[in-house]
Image (tube, rainbow, N blue to C red):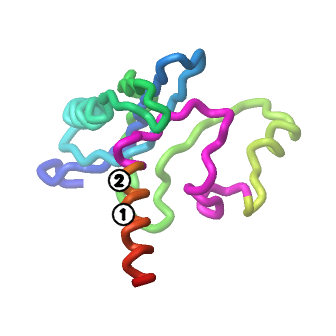
Amino acid sequence: MDESTGCWYVAELIVEFKVDGEQRNVVHRNLVLVRAVNAEEALNHAVELGQQHDADWENTDGKLVEVRFLGLGHLGALEDGIKDGAEILWKENVGVGGDQIKEWLQPQKELAVFQSQRGTPDPDIPNYAPGDIVREADAAVQDFADRRQS
């Protein structure tokens, strides 16, 4: 690829959510695309993207949520660029048994694209939902419903 136009990289951002009063944290491992001229620029840009996650807010229960970018779990060049069938990320495992392979394989209904991202929050996960945004969204939905009934 022409170095003046840059190339694509994939970065794994490690972001931690801590909820006041909760013993457990929540950690997101976000894969993002980064466009850069070289590896050093890709690193700097990936770190900047990660740092944009740093924030504090009050959740829907009135508890403080602290979100911090912890660092990168991966940064690699996309050798094939962005196109249909391009290899984005790979891992090599040696000596893998059949049981482990079965654990990696997911039926269609378990694939993320076929699961609802919304719905009832999982009570086993600390609540890190931003209270002000949830209240604003609830009010907008209620306002919309009220206007439709009028």
Residue carrying label 2:
136
| Circle on res. 17 | none
Question: Magenta stretch: dominant SS?
Answer: loop
Q: Position of residue 21 (x, y in %)?
A: 53, 16
Q: Distance of mark 1 from mark 2, alpha carbons?
A: 6 Å
Q: Residue at x 24, y 54 (%)?
A: 1
Query: Looking at this view, is 37 or 133 the one in front?
Result: 133
Query: Looking at this view, is 38 or 73 the one in front?
Result: 73
Query: Looking at this view, is 144 or 74 the one in front?
Result: 144
Task: Name the amino acid type tagged 1.
Answer: Ala
- Rendered position, 132 above or below 73: below
Task: Name the amino acid type tagged 2.
Answer: Glu
Residue carrying label 1:
140
The magenta segment: 110-134
Q: Residue at x 43, y 36 (%)?
A: 12
- Rendered position, 77 above or below 94: below
Q: Is residue 108 left or right of residue 135?
A: right
Q: Position of residue 26 (x, y in %)?
A: 54, 28
Q: Is residue 105 left or right of residue 134?
A: right
Q: Residue at x 65, y 42 (%)?
A: 122
Discs 1, 2 touching: Cβ within 8 Å: yes
